[in-house]
Amino acid sequence: MRDFLAHPNGHKSVPEPAREVPVLAECDVAVFGGGPAGVCAAAAAGRAGKQVVLVERYGFLGGMATAADVNVLHSLYGTDRKTRVIGGLAEEIIRRLQQRGAARNTNPAGESGGWIICSETAKFVLDDLVIGSGVRLLLHTWLADVIRDGRRIAAALVEGKSGRGAILANVYVDGTGDADLIRRAGVQTQLGDGQGRCQPPSLCFRVGGCKAGAVGLRGVQAELFKTPMDYNGQPYPTFLWGNPGIWDSREHMLAGTRVLGVNLADSTDLTRAEVEARYQLRWVLERLKAMPGWEDCYLVDVAAQIGGRESHRILADHQLTREEVLGGESFPDAVAQGTYPIDIHNPEGPGILFEHLDGTWNRIGGDGSSQQGRWDGQPAGAPPRGTLCYQVPYRSLVPRDLDNVLAAGRCAGANHDAAGAIRVMVNCMQLGQAAGAAAAITPPGASVRQVDAGQVQERLIEDDVPLRLAR
């Protein structure tokens, strides 16, 4: 594919003149990023009676759930499919979607499965949630820079239609996904697997006109893998997955693209990812129409942005590990729980690896083939492990080198493998709610690490979060 990118000149710079910047807002809590984590952080702090400003770059909220068309929220239940381990704002959002007919559980006999949602309706639901919590919204507004004073952020500079302005807050919450706020403070982060390799992003799209009995997605993937892609001659690199539409069974959301070797926190890489993903999408769509049951399919829409899985994460007071996730480690300062497996999309080619809490793993290849085994060293026929869920401690939200900032969502402190589990949206919602609850009880001028995690837990439990506390 031809080089269409404008590459930055690393040898030139221009001076930016000093200027006075108007203060747009002074608040208790400023949240950056209106995705699942940021929305829940803002709502939690707002409901606690704090003055909250939420800054979002798009004209709507939802992040990956809306802008990236990711229409699935994973299970709220433990591995036994009986014990509720996630509640609070994550569950409230699902209930609000249900009331609009815009959420359906994948388990027809109950609610223990994941939830297929309508991404467009989610925009309305999240507006209602945030505005109803007393939060001040700044849409179409970008984080530009921060002013740092020692271990504290003194101001965040934003850019919008009205020009540049400053936001002053007691606590700042980074819900950007890529740790944009924290990186602009000059704090070291971890990129991908520590070697700079990140789980690749996917551009989601929706197609209509799929017939009953059409070839399944595993079969579609196997066919796509047989022929090199026309735009670059490379094999199809994607683990293809998708979901039927919430109202029309002939419509499907497909995560049918994957762009390798990109850092989504780099403008040049992000541009390449968006454009290359659309080249891939066109190739997939044409090939799809040659498969039984997909002959009449047509493009309904393409997500407004590529869906990111991994980029920068904070170096936190506690870095969550693979062993802690798979072993179901309990923490005295736990603020979130989950059961979604470690899910690693191959950073260098096709295939995906899942490691489950029951002790098993499975790997799906580019040709749709599947391998299974045990990660815990037990024989294939051994009983499943009894791990109900894993936990994330409050310390994983606290950057080592900053005192008035919390990280929420996929930029929280975790290693590459653990991040593959906690990055999904129901987990990001929990991390956001915890960050908002902690920010709300941080005294003026105090450090977020001085906050009593027990008080945060009490607030979460009051808000119907079913934490299993280690005593």
Image (tube, helix red, strand yellow):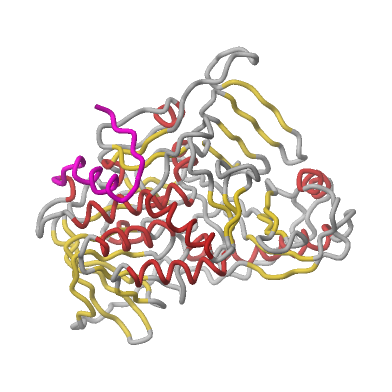
Left or right of 271: which side holds 177? left
Left or right of 458: which side holds 465? right
Residue plotted at (45% across, 69% down): 61
Work out whether 337 lies above or below 448.
above
Q: Is residue 178 visible?
A: yes
Left or right of 295: which side holds 60? left
Residue plotted at (51% across, 47% down): 198
Query: Measured from the top left, where is residue 259 in percent x and y?
Result: 62, 54
Query: Measured from the top left, where is residue 270 in percent x and y?
Result: 53, 63
Q: Is residue 70 visible?
A: no
For the C terminus, give its image quadrant.
top left
The range drawn in magenta is 450-471
For the N terminus, give its image quadrant.
bottom right
Query: Measured from the top left, where is residue 306 in percent x and y?
Result: 57, 62
Viewer-proximal residue, 56 or 286? 56
Query: Measured from the top left, where is residue 48 in percent x and y?
Result: 22, 60
Occupied quadrant, residue 379: top right
Residue plotted at (68% across, 59% down): 253
Viewer-proximal residue, 419 or 196? 419
Does 33 appear in magenta?
no
Viewer-proximal residue, 344 or 109? 109
Residue plotted at (40% across, 65% down): 34
